[in-house]
């Protein structure tokens, strides 16, 4: 059985990877969200389809 710390890290990484794959507009709110998740803006598409 995995400790809770490992499970929470797996969940956080999964969410981070999902956010990295999302197509988003380049707005202040999106930039703040990406900053909070420690995701660089160069890893995100700027198609404006989501968020």
Image (tube, rainbow, N blue to C red):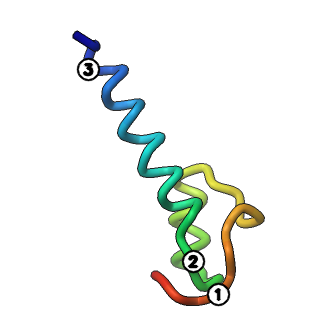
In the rendered image, residue 34, in percent from the top left (x then y), is placed at 57, 62
For this rendering, which residue is in front, 45 or 8?
45
Disc with the residue nearer the chain's start (3 vs 2):
3
Mark 2 and mark 1 residues within 8 Å of each other at the beta carbon: yes
Image quadrant holding the N terminus, namely: top left
In the rendered image, residue 45, in percent from the top left (x then y), is placed at 68, 75
Marker disc for residue 8: none
Q: How packed is label 1: few (under 14 Cα within 10 Å), some, or many (20 or more)?
A: few
Disc with the residue nearer the chain's start (1 vs 3):
3
**Left or right position of 43 against 6:** right
* Mark 1 lies on residue: 47
* Mark 2 lies on residue: 23
Mark 3 and mark 2 residues within 8 Å of each other at the beta carbon: no
Classify residue 39 by image quadrant. bottom right
Compared to residue 2, the image places residue 20 above or below, namely below
In the structure shown, which secondary structural element does the residue marked by tag 3 occupy?
helix
Disc with the residue nearer the chain's start (2 vs 1):
2
Identified at 41% across, 30% down, the residue is 9
In the rendered image, residue 21, in percent from the top left (x then y), is placed at 57, 63
């Amino acid at each position: 059985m995995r400790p809770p710390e490992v499970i929470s890290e797996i969940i956080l990484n999964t969410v981070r990877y999902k956010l990295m794959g999302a197509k988003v507009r380049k707005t202040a709110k999106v930039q703040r969200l990406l900053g909070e998740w420690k995701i660089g803006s160069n890893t995100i598409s700027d198609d404006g389809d989501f968020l």
